[in-house]
Amino acid sequence: MNDTSAPLNRKGPPKPTDALHRIGSTAQPHEMRDPFDIGEALAALSLSGEPVTVFPSGWVEPLLARIESVDPELPHFVLDFTGSERPPAGKATLVASLGGNAKLQFELDQSWKPAPDNTMHVRAEFPPSCLVLNRRAARRVETPVGVNYMASFRLNGVYTELPLYDFSQGGVGLRATPGQLFGLHVGRKLEGVRLELGPNLVIMADLEVRLLRPFRTFLLGDQVQVGCSFASISMQMQQTLERFVTTGTPERRAAAR
């Protein structure tokens, strides 16, 4: 269910030239605290193989790693220090580039003990918060309570409908029951998805599953948030979506082409 296997274009082992600087003291990052957003960012780094620069407390030279996998259920992730070395016990600051347009930074304080199956792998819990600098943040629009806007698509040949709980210019958030997750995993592509994003906006797009996060509600019981990014969307649809997210009033209904 939480398969975070990398795509074919995942970056190779990091090189010394990949090291990043920490966010400067005069910069103005914003703080990210939502576990869903943090998990989504870590999953994106895992899928891309983007280098992670690790600054152990008191060290001058940083170490380099990659995020091997992310498990949002625990929640934890695994750092791969292959080609470098593991940090000493204590605090460390981790810095990575998000999609080339933002810098992510957070701190971990732990023993950095190796995983039982690989001496260069280290398990870590999600940080409680991250700093994000220069992120082109996409404003999220939550679907109204009591109204079900749906995502409709075929999954393993079966017609599937899942309700949306929010959307942005970068993607959508879906809600599913554990029984509806068969065939869904991180990295799964969903083609030709029909998205109802409001009473006046329907678009067609290809999606990529970026995060699965279980949660529980009093009324619905066990649920799973399915975070998806747009893998393919036409320029016309993108412009219509941008206009709606920004103003809430699309000029016309976008129909499937």
Image: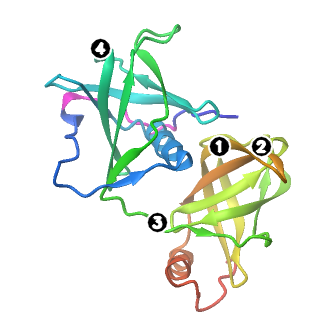
Looking at the picture, which amino acid does disc 3 mark?
Answer: Ala
Between the residue at mark 3 and the residue at mark 1, the CA separation in whole angstroms equals 20 Å
Residue depicted at x 52% and y 34%: 6
Between the residue at mark 3 and the residue at mark 4, the CA separation in whole angstroms equals 37 Å
| Residue 36 visible from this viewpoint | yes
Which residue bears the numbered disc 3? 138
Q: Which quarter shows the N terminus?
A: top right
Q: Nearer the viewer, mark 3 or mark 2?
A: 3
Compared with 59, 187 (above or below) is below
**Structural crowding at the residue carrying mark 4, measured as other residues with C-alpha within 10 Å and reported as few (<14), some (14–19) or many (≥20):** some
Which residue bears the numbered disc 1? 212
Q: Nearer the viewer, mark 1 or mark 4?
A: 4
**Structural crowding at the residue carrying mark 2, measured as other residues with C-alpha within 10 Å and reported as few (<14), some (14–19) or many (≥20):** some
Question: Between disc 3 and disc 4, whose residue precedes?
Answer: 4
Q: Are marks 2 and 4 in contact (CB under 8 Å)?
A: no
Image mark for residue 88: 4
**Structural crowding at the residue carrying mark 3, measured as other residues with C-alpha within 10 Å and reported as few (<14), some (14–19) or many (≥20):** some
Residue depicted at x 28% and y 26%: 64
State the image coordinates of residue 230 (x, y, percent, origin top left).
Answer: 56, 60
Q: What segment carries the magenta color? A: 7-16
Residue depicted at x 43% and y 30%: 67
State the image coordinates of residue 84 (x, y, percent, origin top left).
Answer: 28, 18
Image mark for residue 181: 2
Q: Are marks 1 and 2 in contact (CB under 8 Å)?
A: yes
Looking at the picture, which amino acid does disc 1 mark?
Answer: Leu
Question: Which residue, as the protein is rendered here, is positioned at the far bottom?
Answer: 251
